[in-house]
Image (cartoon, grey):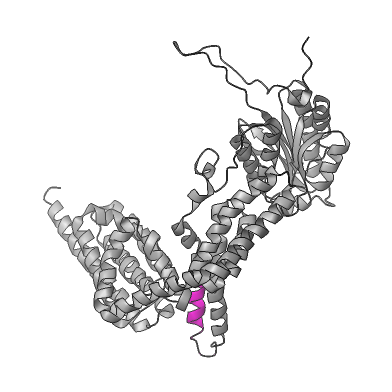
Amino acid sequence: MVADRPASDRQPSEGPSSDAEPDGAASRARAPRRRIAVLGSSGGNLRSHGGDDPAKLLGDIRRQLEAAGFELAAVQFVAADASMDGIGERARAALWGLAEGRIGPLAEGALAEINATARERDAQLAERIRAGEIDALVLVSADPAGTNAAAVTAAVEAGLPAAGTGGSSIAKAQQLGLRLVSASGTTGTTSTTRAVAYASGLARHWGAKYRPSLGSAGAGSAGDEPAWRRISIRGIMVGSIPAFITLALILAIGKIPGLEGLSEVFDLLIAALPIVVAAVAARKISGLDEVGLVAGAIAGTLAQPGGILGGLVGGILAGLLASWLVRLFLGWRFPATTANIFTGAIAGALPGLLVFFVLAPVTAWLGEGVQALIQAVLEFSPLLAGALAGLVIWPAIIGGVYHAVLLPLVLLEMSQKGHSFFGAIDMAALVMVSFGITMANLLAPRTSGERALAGSGAGVNFFFGTFVEASYPFMFGDKRVFAIALVAATAGGAVVGLTGAEATAYLPAIAAPFVSTTAVGMVTAMATSAAIAFAGTLVVNLFARRKARPAA
């Protein structure tokens, strides 16, 4: 006689199957996936820890469950417009669930009405549990003695395992006899790390292989890659641009008579740049949202003596370490709250101390060396350096080199003095050349359809200092326009070199002269490149239109 298997270790629920198999194919039994039901609410404390964003909270859970090979089979989540600590029954709320495989709100109304609807669905879920269609529960600030009572009771009777967070609700579930394989409070957690804790606990219970799916990509894609594959210098630098723009603006405003006191603010911002870069790097690489952000901020603070490169190194190491530590701590059965806190603290402190005591002199020397090299080239021949930089910047951005090499150089220069030679080249040789080309096509397009395309591009170029790709259709459509762009960029770059102008990128064209080292030089360089690009493209377009007339 075979002994009965414990209910909690029963076979996974069977999904729909087909008896038909391809001719000649070997018959292989496919192991059914474990089916998980999520119960919960936006809670009290949880609301300030991701509960106010049900789409992300539930999406993160689904992503981690799928990474562990499980299936999200049911969702019953009550999301209120305010914290549920002392909330009234008339407060607005929504019931989130699964509909045709998609997570979304199923009903909206007063909290009392939504709770009543949730109880009805809870009773239906309880029947599914008793029918063996659910293998485990995930509780997210649930209400085991109220709204979720039927499902929790059925899970207790069936001996299902459960994972959950929410101090008071978890305590109630344990009192009812629910078998919790992973339990924690909410404080200090994020939607991502809670989801990792749920999936980790259930995977450990069933002996399933599980590697957290972190990063911005969805499960099954780039987000499943190791953390080191998420290292992108370009992505880190682009994400840090707002801090550098702030630096440039403060520097410019500080030149206004009576506002010289802002020089102290400028110095403070210079010192803070390694923190910003480290925080962005750690967040992107770890895939742990706030935990990675805090780890990066700690590492960046300690890495300040190493400059922006020290912050970059510290942030990258913090992100890599955080991604590894959170898995380690959850594997050791640390509560999610403790795992989060320890991960952020240790992942920030260790790389930060490494940079502070060992790497800072090296990174500071490298940063100063790059700046010294740029300065040496400019002193050797400002005209040649500017012209050459202007000439290569278009091939660089088209070939994908700009964001990988030139943009980091812009930010590296700005981190030391608030303005950059390559920043001025960016504005004069890229933005203003694109502006000239698009303006010519706005005034004298070859076809009527090109006017609208050129108009929107010219506006973004001038008023926002970006989207130079707006000129691509015209440059790639006619080699002569491309050649004109190179000539205009070279001329504008030469003027930048001659006048010694330094500025920044990603600012409106009208603002660029005010943040530059020489407004006259910057305006001259911008006007030179824009005028050549405009005039050359206009002539090419007029000839093309004249040539097309006889054929019409």
Q: Please tell me whether residue 255 belongs to the stretch shown in magenta.
A: yes
| Residue lying furthest right | 175
Q: Is 390 or 401 nearer to us in this picture?
A: 401
Q: Is residue 281 visible?
A: no
Q: Residue at x 54, y 90 (%)?
A: 258
Q: Is residue 464 magenta?
A: no
Q: Main secondary structure of the magenta part?
A: helix
Residue 501 visible here: yes
Determine which quarter of the picture holds residue 208: top right
Q: Position of residue 200 (x, y in %)?
A: 67, 39
Q: Residue at x 53, y 37 (%)?
A: 220
Q: Is residue 45 above or below residue 515?
A: above
**Relative horizontal placement of residue 535, taking residue 512 as reference (left or right):** left
Q: Residue at x 35, y 63 (%)?
A: 458
Residue under the image location 70 percent in, 40 percent down: 198
Relative horizontal placement of residue 52, taking residue 319 as reference (left or right): right
Please tell me which residue lies in front, 154 or 95: 154
User: Can you name the residue that lies furthest to the left here?
Assistant: 550
Quarter in which the N terminus is drawn = top right
Residue interval drawn in magenta: 245-258
- Residue 254 vs 197, above or below: the answer is below
Q: Position of residue 248 (x, y in %)?
A: 48, 75
Viewer-closest of 95 and 228: 228
How many tags in the picture? 0
Residue 510 point in image, percent of width and height: 40, 74
Residue 522, given in percent of the width and then of the height, sits at: 34, 78
On the picture, is 214 further left or further right than 515? right
Foreground residue, 151 or 21? Answer: 21
Res. 79 image quadrant: top right
Give the quarter of the image for residue 204.
top right
